Amino acid sequence: MWRVARFAASNVRSSSQRRLFSAAVIPGACIVHKRGADILHDPWFNKDTGFPLTERDRLGLRGLLPPRVISFEQQYDRFMESYRSLEKNTQGQPYSVVSLAKWRILNRLHDRNEILYYRALIDNIKDFAPIIYTPTVGLVCQNYSGLFRRPRGMYFSAKDKGEMMSMIYNWPGQQVDMIVLTDGSRILGLGDLGVQGIGIPIGKLDMYVAAAGINPQRILPVMLDVGTNNQKLLEDPLYLGLRQPRLEGEEYLSIVDEFMEAVHTRWPKAIVQFEDFQMKWAFETLLRYRKRFCMFNDDVQGTAGVALAGLLGTVRAQGRPLSDFVNQKIVVVGAGSAGLGVLNMTIQALSRMSGNNEIAAKNQCYLLDKDGLITKERKNLDPAAAPFAKDIKDAEGLKEGASLLEVVKKLKPHVLLGLSGVGGIFNEQVLRAMRESDSPKPAIFSMSNPTMNAECNAADAFKHAGPNIVFASGSPFENVDLGNGKVGHVNQANNMYLFPGIGLGTLLSGSHFITDGMLQAAAECLASYMTDEEIQKGILYPSIDSIRHITAEVGAAVVRAAVEEDLAEGHGEVGSRELKHMSKEETVAYVTQNMWFPVYSPLVHEK
Ligand SMILES: NC(=O)C1=CN([C@@H]2O[C@H](COP(=O)(O)OP(=O)(O)OC[C@H]3O[C@@H](n4cnc5c(N)ncnc54)[C@H](O)[C@@H]3O)[C@@H](O)[C@H]2O)C=CC1
Ligand SMILES: CC(=O)C(=O)O
Ligand SMILES: [Mg+2]
């Protein structure tokens, strides 16, 4: 096992500080149970030409590598040079060609040498996150059959019913801390991609390693293949998943049940993040498992916290006190797992701030789906959306099913937040209507992924809704040049700012459950992270460059919430008593010190 890497300081925000920070890592020895070529073919242990001569002798590697030993720094520079020349050589080519070429070069390194891969990822997170995460990961999932070279993670299919308890022991890692699980039924805004959705757990877990310092030997991406209803995939001769329609009802749940039991039998403390499940199963599984296992749903709960932090930021951006949040009119477009999760957490926060007045809180919020404004008059109203359906008498004269444009024109909302998965629905007319918003700095959150599915792009938002808006998107866009030296700041409102800290904080607290209190603490931590000066410039979230720092803070907030709720049993040598006595700063230091960092450790062979 890797010894935990130790960091010198916890308060690191600039890139020069980060470099110092990484230089202070002390590598521990690592036990390996294999020798010779088996080591070179194992990306967990392989150092390529970086094996020192003594290690080559000890591990039976002499003669299997060219004689010259190359330092880690040289290997790193060599990789970055080839990445930069790929960038240069593909300039001007279509987005899909360039980004898939970048993904391939990163993926090859991932498959060969994980230490070098994760170091490159951490040091270049701003450049590489859009490749290994949204938006390119969406393209990768769509093209998975053609891109597939080597398996990564585990695949449990409907055909494995009754076998999962033994299958779970096929995983080579002794300990697993973090699992990201999908059934591929709603991959970003791209719909049902069946087994091809495995790219999402892989990308999310890469973010866990990069942002939270979860040891990559202790992560497990999982695909639960219960079939697909995507006809194109079913007819594709190269499709790698089960060629059958999706299981439904009890049959479906029995597969998820069996998986959850198997995982927690082998690794009772593993945390399972449910990701990109279609809405009905997202809610059903959350309800079914959250009091039995350590799990959460990222799309429902992680997204909600990030959106709430952003909404509170928009109040500060208007120069108003946070208490003014209760006066904001918020329109949420998309009544799926993400939209309802956001609305639920927002109403809870509004309600708390207005003296537990849930009715007043609900009055501030409007919800639309593909059929327009959702009111209590809706026929076949989805039970999940029912608590947020407008009473027609409170709908400001708007009718059931009113269009987005009608709603925006009538309400003049402070916030327009999209989680519909439909690209371009914040069209020119809708954005122009936002110019009449009651807010001096109207907020437009175009949170759907990947880029093509964003409700609007950044340039259109500033062009049509005006330079005063506060803008956030789920996938990254460049800042917008507004002329006269002014910049329209683009925020990335993505659950990546919270899920790594939720997972890490839960792990280090030793809590068996992830409660609303822990999630709320995570959201509040993110909300209070930015300074007033940054917020005034329209910057609502930290730069992705400081994702490790924000994750340490969020992780610590989650640990402290678990302690407060008496759920924290501790982790490793740190028990519940020690956690209870830690100050806020000590908790941040504890979390930071437990972040893994990629450095070559001496390998020691053991039979
Ligand atoms: N930025 C972030 O961190 C996150 C972004 N998302 C994105 O949110 C999107 C939706 O995800 P889910 O809620 O899980 O999907 P979902 O499929 O459960 O819900 C989509 C909702 O949008 C509605 N809709 C469809 N067409 C519409 C239209 N023309 N006008 C208004 N509403 C319309 C549907 O009726 C449905 O209520 C995806 O693109 C996903 O990538 C999801 C989670 C996190
Ligand atoms: C970011 C994310 O979780 C999604 O788009 O589904
Ligand atoms: Mg997701």
Image (cartoon, rainbow, N blue to C red):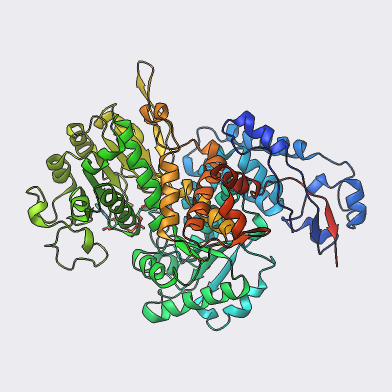
The structure residue drawn at horizontal position 58% and vertical position 54%, both measured from the top left corner, is 579
**Is 190 on the left or on the right of 425, as rendered?**
right
* Nearer to us in this view, 195 or 2: 2
Residue 25 position (above or below residue 183): above
In the image, is residue 127 above or below residue 375?
Answer: above
Q: Residue 387's quadrant in the figure?
A: bottom left
Res. 460 visible in picture: no
Q: Position of residue 349 (x, y in %)?
A: 31, 50
Q: Is residue 9 left or right of residue 431?
A: right
Q: Picture coordinates of residue 109 (x, y %)?
A: 67, 48
Asked if residue 413 is positioned above or below residue 534 in the image, the reply reads: below
Q: Nearer the viewer, residue 156 or 24?
A: 24
For the residue pair 523 and 332, the one nearer the viewer reads as 523
Identify the residue at image location x=50%, y=61%: 566
The percent position of residue 399, horizontal first and vertical second, equals: 9, 53
Placement of 575 over or under 311, stated as above or below:
below
Please name the residue shown 26% across and 51% down the image.
Answer: 351
The image quarter containing residue 410 is: top left
Task: Decide if residue 527 is in sight here.
Answer: yes
- The single residue placed furthest to the bottom in the displayed view is 162
